[in-house]
Image (tube, grey):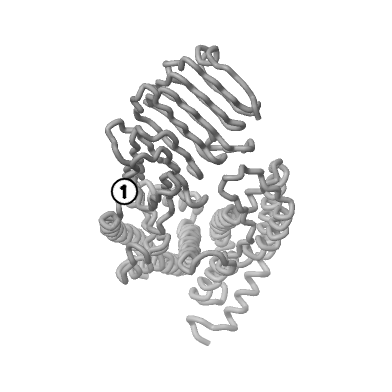
Amino acid sequence: MKPQFSKAGVWLFLAAVVWYVAGNFALESMNKNNLALAKSLHQTEHHFDIGKLESVVIRAQNNNVWTGGIKVVFDPNATQASINNENLRLSVNGKMLDGVLNISLDNIETRQYRQTSEFTVLLPPTLKKVKFSGIDSVTLSGSLPASDAELNLEITDCRSTVNMGNLIVNHLKLTSACQTKLKKHWNEEGFVLGDGVQINQLDVSMQFGMLKFSSAAIPKQIQLNIGDEVVVTGQREFLKSVHFSNKF
Amino acid sequence: MSNFFDSTRFARLWRAHWAESWRDYAWFAGIMVMVNLIIILISFSTDTEHTFSMFQRSVQINWYAVGLFVSAMVFAGRYFKHMVNPGASLITLMRPASIFEKWLLAFVVISILFPLVYTLGYVLMNYPAVQLAKASYIAPPLCDSCPPFAPDFGFYIPFITVEMEKTSAEVLRFFKMQLFYVLLLSAGQAVIAGGTVFFKRSPVLKTVLILFLLSILMAWIGCVPQLGIFASLNDDVLVPQGVAEYGLSIGLWLGLPVMLWTALFLHLKEREVA
């Protein structure tokens, strides 16, 4: 028996390894070209002239829309609502309805590209109310410089977590319409006020969920109208300043 | 009577193999049934809120796929276990059958019959469990404006059950994903079985070591598995897949198991000659 033939199985195995490597590199190269094409076809920027509108709703069309990395920024210099959508899997639809700007997010059926998924909503400081519906997680920041500025943030379900950081506003109202205590292993619905949050007056109305306050600047007035199941986390200075009520 | 393949001789080989191995297979099946039963019981007993997410369709698919993959690799590793023992391997290799018939028997048992029997067992055990979960499900109360949450207790049978509310493109995508899984499973079984034939001592350990070293090598050279046509969600909208991508994907992921099963055939030939 020829020695070469006796190792034919080994050679074929090595050929399979080379086949695997070469095939994957070729497919990867093809994928890169397709990604470049998809990016060139994707609409990244959206602008909405909202005039005197004071209310915005950001909504996911269904449960399957990925809404994990949304950023909302209040830009004191902005005069219109703008969206920068670099997420190839997300489509944006904006409509003015009954004095409210409705921003709907939906899935685009496309390849599952591995990339960062930036989605930023830039809002003018004239807005007074932002509602989140079906959104998993939002990072909110920015400034509403008017001395009497008031901002209402509302969660309409038991799904959203609004993380606030570097946010400056006179009067902040937080509302959650969640009506049940749900167990979540990876997220908890509610509000997180982190570093750089500067507010004079804080009003919170929620029956379930969580509220975390870790900013160094404690508001002068804090009114928490919260249910018995709400978990409030904060440092001593914050908790000392709170007025609690339960009108549910 | 052909030296390459003879149906009568193959049938005799099959009967001899079954007579020797049916007890091992029965034990293997028994252990898998026990493991599955324990998982089902744990899932029922720990779900105090009666949402039974473990029995919903997406989790069913994962459970089926992981269970089949792991057990199929173990089964493939045990098929040629007698090759470790020189006496037993001699008896097996000297059986009056061609190398192709012995290889074909291995392919049929490992790559075709085992997944079919596993699927049958899975359906028999898990279908009643899913129906029980569906009947016992209690929907969590949500607020009026919350998006509706619809649990999906549709029972999953590979390549057969189709979610009727999905578009034809989504159905096709899911079919392609299942096909890819089958090809990958077959390739994995071929590697494990081939290793147990090739290595005379500690075959499973050496095969696993080789695979581990290969995975390190792949990571080092930056070779990331590309699924091509099997991975896309729906390509028809933005970037249609071309003929080249179809050819490359099928060539890669079908060629791999073909080459590995052929390598097993050559390993068997070498052992017989040696």
Q: Considering the numbered disc 1 on the image, is that residue within a helix, a strand or a loop?
A: strand
Quarter of the image where one finds residue A223? top right
Q: Quadrant of residue B78?
A: bottom right
* Residue B274 seen anywhere in this rendered image of the structure: no
- Nearer-the-camera pick, A29 or B136: B136
Q: Amino acid at mark 1?
A: His
Could you tell whether B252 is left or right of B118 in the image? left
> In the rendered image of this protein, does residue A70 appear above or below residue A43?
above
Q: Quadrant of the C terminus of chain B?
A: bottom left
Q: Which of B237/B153 is in front?
A: B237
Q: How far from the left and from the top, in percent, is residue A27?
A: 31, 60
Q: Is residue A224 above or below residue B271?
A: above
B254 displayed left or right of A48:
right
Q: Nearer the viewer, residue B161 or A54?
A: A54
Crowding at dot 1, Cα within 10 Å, few <14 / some 14-19 / many 20+, comes out as some
Choose top left, top right, bottom left or bottom right for residue A183. Answer: top right
Where does the image place residue A234, in percent across and percent down from the top left?
A: 52, 19
Residue A170 relative to residue A232: left or right: left
Residue at x 51%, y 15% (from the top left corner): A238
Asked whether residue A73 is in view, the answer is: yes
- Measuring from the top left, give residue B67's x and y in whole percent: 59, 54
Q: Residue furthest bottom?
A: B1
Closest to the observer, B41 or A215 = A215
Q: Which residue is mark 1?
A: A46
Number of numbered discs on residues: 1
Give the chain letter at badge 1: A
Q: Position of residue A30 (x, y in %)?
A: 28, 60
What residue do we see at 48% from left, 56% from top?
B200
- What residue do we see at 63% from left, 28% from top? A227
| Residue drawn 36% across the image and 43% down it | A119
